[in-house]
Image (cartoon, rainbow, N blue to C red):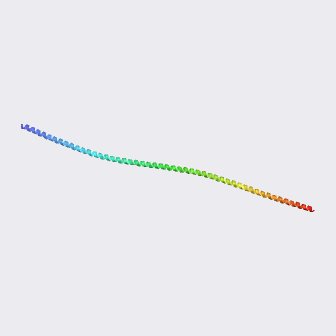
Amino acid sequence: DDFEEYKEWYYALTSASVGLKHKKSMAADVAAAAAAEEKARLAAEKKAAEEAEEAAEQMRLEDEIAEMALRTRMRAEEEARAAEKARLQAEEEARVAEAARLQAEEDARWKAEEDAIARVRVAAAEETARRKAEEDASRARAEEEARLREEEEAREMEEAEEARRLADEAAAAKKSAEAEE
């Protein structure tokens, strides 16, 4: 009986020991699992924090890139506006220069026409003056010829008068001489 009791007691003790070992093993497993879970949680948190930091850095970089792109676009737009303004200014200056050139050509044409008209007027005035001078000279010659003719006619009349007087005197002298005879 003692042996049976001892066997039961030994079995119970062994079972208890095995159960305790099993419980310890399970507790160790649970603790290990909890530790592993905690480690995994910490690793996951660390990874999540790193990923969040990387995402924040990525967002910051993307924001910087977007801001740089915006600044570049705004600068390009400003340069395009300045180029367009310069182009419009150049076109306006070209229009003004063309208008000035056309005005200068028009002025030169008018001046040339006025000069031509003035030359025609001067030539006409010179021609008129030449004709008047010729007419005056011709009239003066005609007047001089008429005066000379009148003087010649007057001299001829005086000579004829003198010849008649002399003839009359000669006739009277002859008559007187004949009368005296």
**Residue at the spot x=16%, y=41% of the render?**
23
Image quarter of residue 176: bottom right
Farthest-out residue, left: 1
The quarter of the picture where the C terminus appears is: bottom right
Of residue 55 and residue 101, the one placed in the foreground of this image is 101
Quadrant of the image occupied by residue 26 = top left
Seen as rendered, the residue at the extreme bottom is: 180
Residue 132: image location, x then y, percent: 69, 54
Question: Where does residue 45 sit, x and y in percent of width and height?
Answer: 26, 45
Where residue 148 sits: x, y (%)? Answer: 77, 57
Left or right: 59, with 143 as reference point: left
Q: Nearer the viewer, residue 76 or 167?
A: 167
* Residue plotted at (30% across, 46% down): 52
Q: Quadrant of the N terminus?
A: top left
Residue drawn at point x = 87 percent, y = 60 percent: 168
Q: Is residue 137 left or right of residue 111?
A: right
Number of residue marks: 0
Q: Please report the residue visible at 38 percent of the width from the left and 47 percent of the height from the top.
A: 70
Q: Is residue 163 left or right of residue 98?
A: right
Q: Position of residue 172 (x, y in %)?
A: 88, 61
In the figure, 180 relative to 78: above or below? below
